[in-house]
Amino acid sequence: MSGILYLCATPIGNLQDMTFRVLDTLKEADLIAAEDTRNSIKLLNHFEIKTPMTSYHEFNKYEKAETLIEQLKSGKNIALITDAGTPAISDPGEVLVRRAKEEGIIVTSLPGACAAITALTISGLPTRRFVFEGFLPSEKKERKAVLENLKNEERTIILYEAPHHLKGTLKELEEYLGDRQITLCRELTKKFEEAPCMTIPGARQFYEEHDPKGEYVLVISGADPNLKKEEQIRAFEEMTLEEHMQMYLDEGLDRKEAMKKVAADRGVSKREIYKELLGEG
Ligand code: SAM
């Protein structure tokens, strides 16, 4: 019988956020795989956990996953922890989970702290629909593509950011997303937790004068669908009627269907479009 892979959420700052179930599981597991053993030993010492620990991090995630899979297959129960929060969220846990599932090993998740959700709940922004982007890609082209996509994203956006990249990221966010609302959540669950609501340009300006400190979760309002609609109408109005018609004809619509679409885009009747095109308007 294979062992079980337990994903154990650990606190993101406040040690009291450790759950009873995670404590028991860490004590009872055969092995703990930790992102940074030097960091996690403090947590284990605090809770008097004596289970052996091994490292599983960004730079050994593929080879080490295979070793851990072998150990799971031999019947060992392994608890995965990361530096903070929920394993597999913006950390190498994802790779190990995928391999375990491929091998038919049972994976179970013990819920607890997660910086993204903690930030979202105190952001003051809509929580019903949101999109989690994690860290923006560091590769230039990929990063540009993600930012470009976010321009039209109507859901609340959650990003992770390290303090030394915050100023640069805010500049880019201003360039791509403009004057949106942003809540900058830092030191979550800790003594100096704060989550000020600003505009992106306001935050960019603030951090030009103040050095960012601590880890950040940025929660940003989604694109306003009404503004988008207005922009679209403006773009249609800038076209001639013929150009507008041609746009739909090029998409393969017949003249009648194209006329119907053009009329809807411009908020007028089909008859008016027809008359205009005949030069009677
Ligand atoms: N797996 C973790 C989780 O569940 O949130 C996230 C790991 S990711 C490597 C680390 C990032 O999470 C940080 O750069 C920061 O953006 C965010 N983060 C973690 N702890 C935080 C805290 N106490 N306050 C604000 N952001 C935090």
Image: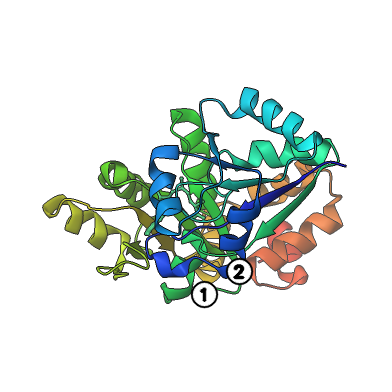
Q: Between marks 1 and 2, how big is the CA–CA gap? A: 7 Å
29 lies left or right of 211: right
Q: Position of residue 104 (x, y in %)?
A: 86, 41
Count numbered badges in the picture: 2
Which residue is label 1 attached to? 126
**Which residue appears at 65% of the width and 49% of the height?**
29
Point out the residue furthest to the top here. Answer: 63
Can I make out residue 64 in this image?
Answer: yes
**Which residue appears at 68% of the width and 26% of the height?**
67
Can I make out residue 279 in this image?
Answer: no
- Circle 1 SS class: loop
Query: Is 99 or 274 nearer to us in this picture?
Result: 99
**Which residue appears at 56% of the width and 50% of the height?**
89
Quadrant assignment for the C terminus: bottom right
Classify mark 1 as within 8 Å of ligand 1 or not, answering yes or no. Answer: no
- Residue 249 sits in quarter: top right
Give the label on residue 142, or none: none
185 lies left or right of 278: left
Q: Position of residue 280 (x, y in %)?
A: 69, 64
Which residue is label 2 attached to? 129
- What amino acid does circle 2 point to? Arg
- What amino acid does circle 1 point to? Pro
**Tag 1 near tag 2, CB within 8 Å:** yes
Query: Is 164 or 67 nearer to us in this picture?
Result: 67
Query: Is 243 or 78 nearer to us in this picture?
Result: 78
Label 1: how many Cα within 10 Å (few below 14, some 14–19, many 20+): some
In the displayed structure, would residue 206 be above or below residue 72? below
